[in-house]
Each structure stands twice: as structure tokens, then as C-alpha cells.
Image (cartoon, helix red, strand yellow):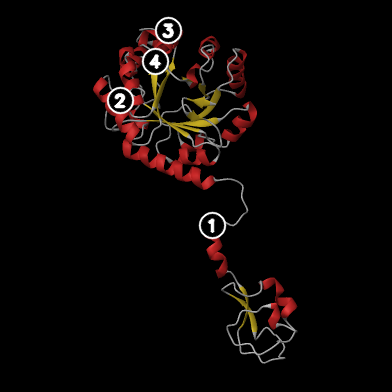
Amino acid sequence: MKIAHHTIDPGAPPLIIAEMSGNHNQSLDKALEIVEAAAKAGAQALKLQTYTADTMTLDINEGEFFIEDEQSPWKGKSLHDLYTLAHTPWEWHAPIMERARELGMICFSTPFDRSAVDFLENLGVPAYKIASFEIVDLPLIRYIAGQGKPIILSTGMATLAEIDEAVHTIREAGNDQIALLKCTSAYPAPPEEMNLRTIPHLAAAFGAPVGLSDHTLGIATSVAAVALGACIIEKHFTLSRADPGPDSAFSLEPHEFKAMVDAVRETEKALGTVCYEVSEHEKASRVFRRSLFAVRDIEAGEVFTEENVRSIRPGYGLPPKYLPVVLGRRAAGKITRGTPLSWDLIL
């Protein structure tokens, strides 16, 4: 799968996405500042969310529409108020995307209804992200798939059967450009609930590249995911967690995001391939292996024993495996202490 010029594949460098979400706090200037900071921190892509409060929910401030969960970072808000605060005004999308392109990043979005898909199509987005919460909205998924663009499908909260339904819906629409994201939809997500070993299982189960949408507070989980084969890393990005944004508490600041990018890139290099060949840097070290040396002066015809021959460093003599063969045989000539043994010195 490719998104713009980025290949999404286990053999390619992971695509690193900065999720802006609502961390602009309803300031376009701040949104553009986030774009610039994300590019500087090493993000290759910027992701937005495209909705309005009215396309997401109803303006009701009680009952099921009011957040009372003590564990939620949004406790005490109605859904409508939360989405009003967090949404990115649609008229901002074009300038944000243009600035991202100028800085060499691809920019795409998560649509939450058909009108958002139509709007993003007019902007020429290169791909779509489907949020975890929308994985059960099969009509919306079918409509997105019908646009023929690559799709990143987040799997938080979903059962294996629900993931299968969503993937089947996309492929049934004639679109096989799918990447999945392992995701734990908790904000923030505790590391012990991440279950990163699901990443290779998802890849095998659905024949698709798999990445991680990471809501943990640090960078270790993202790095570990790359070691397990993650092809995409998505992290929420903020200029400062001190800002009162709806997602800032579980977002990375620029210096943290850069540290994550650097760690991911180092991990990616270290993974390499299955290889048992001696590396170029190892070749010079081979001389410091053990080998057989004369450790005493040995007269011609003298018997080799454990007292006058030992396996020591460096590695210029016969390999240590020949010690049982050498012991009991005789010296072909006088051998000075510190001489590496070779077959021409042995009768």
C-alpha cells in the first residue's frame, strides 16, 4: 500500500503520523504552528479530524449525552460541547493542508460522516483514516472505501469479528488498499492494556500492513511496536500539555515527538534482516577471538601438552577446536613462547 510517496509495508520505514485533533484550541494560528512543529519534529504526515458537533451528536446536556465517567478526561462535558471545542473548522482544512505540503508532509483526515468525505474529496486528500469508534459504521466505511483511496483502519474496542466485518466491507467495495492500526481506546492508555503482540497476529489474519495508534503517555510503546513489525505510528501532538486542549493531556510535546522519531528510526535500522553473515565491522574483531598459542618455549620434538599450549586471545593461531588433535603430538622445530600454532609447526 502507498500513501502519496510513502510505502506502507513491513520492509519500508514506518510512516510516522502526528495527530493534531483538537489541540489547536480553536486558533488557526496555533494550528499552523502545530504543523510547523510537527514537521520539525520528524512527522511525515499530519492527520486532522473532519466533523462538526452537529454531525457527531445531538445538542443535549443530560442523560446519555453527558459524560460522567470518572476516568474520562472529558468528564463534566456534554458530547456536543466536547465536539464543539475539539472540532477543526472546515475552512481551516485547506490552509493547514497547504502548509503541511509546503513542509514536505502529507496531510489527510478522519471523516465522521458522508458530508465530511465529500468535503475531503474536494480537497484531494491522499488517504482516509477511519477512527476506532466508527469501525462499526459499515455504511460510512463502504462510502469511504468507494472513493478508491488508501484507508487506515483503527481497531480500538473492536472484536476480531468486527474488524473482519469492516475489512470485508472495504474489500467488497473494490478497495484493497488497507492498513490496520492496533489501538487501545483509552485516554491515556495504560501500557499493560496495549497488547502489542496483537500486531503480527493482525497482519497475518488480514493480510494487511499493521501499525499502532498510540495513546500511552510515553514513547516506549511506539518503539516496541516497530520492533514487532508496526508499519505506521500515530501519536497525538501538542505544543504543550499545559495548554487546556481536549487531547493535550495524552499528547506528545515537540521534543518528545522528536525523541520518539529518533528512537523509531534507530530501531528500524537495528531490525535489519535475518542474517548470519559477518558484518563489515565484525570482520576486524575476528582477530580477537581465541586460538592456539605456544605459552612456553617449546623445543623441537617436544610433546605438546596443556602446560605449553593454550587457547588464548588473539585469533592468529589454529582454532581452539583443534586442541585435542594437537595435544600429544610433537613440535616440528623450536617454538618461541607467544607463537601462534599452525599445522607446519606440528609433526
How far apart marks 2 and 3 lie (CA) works out to: 26 Å
Picture layout, residue 339 above or below residue 168: below
The numbered mark, 2 or 4, whose residue comes first in the sequence reads: 4
User: What residue lies at 41% left-to-right and 13% top-to-bottom?
Assistant: 120
The numbered mark, 1 or 3, whose residue comes first in the sequence reads: 3
Residue 335 sits in quarter: bottom right
Picture layout, residue 51 above or below residue 209: above
Circle 1 or circle 3, nearest the eye: 1
Circle 2 or circle 3, nearest the eye: 3
User: What residue lies at 41% left-to-right and 39% top-to-bottom?
Assistant: 261
Q: Amino acid at mark 3?
A: Ser
Q: Looking at the image, which is closer to me, 79 or 61?
A: 79
Q: Looking at the image, which is closer to me, 191 or 253?
A: 253
How far apart marks 4 and 1 lie (CA) works out to: 50 Å
User: What residue lies at 59% left-to-right and 57% top-to-bottom?
Assistant: 278
Q: State the residue position of label 4.
A: 50
Residue 108 sits in quarter: top left
Can residue 296 be seen from the camera position used here? Answer: yes
Q: State the residue position of label 2.
A: 245
Image quadrant occupied by the C terminus:
bottom right
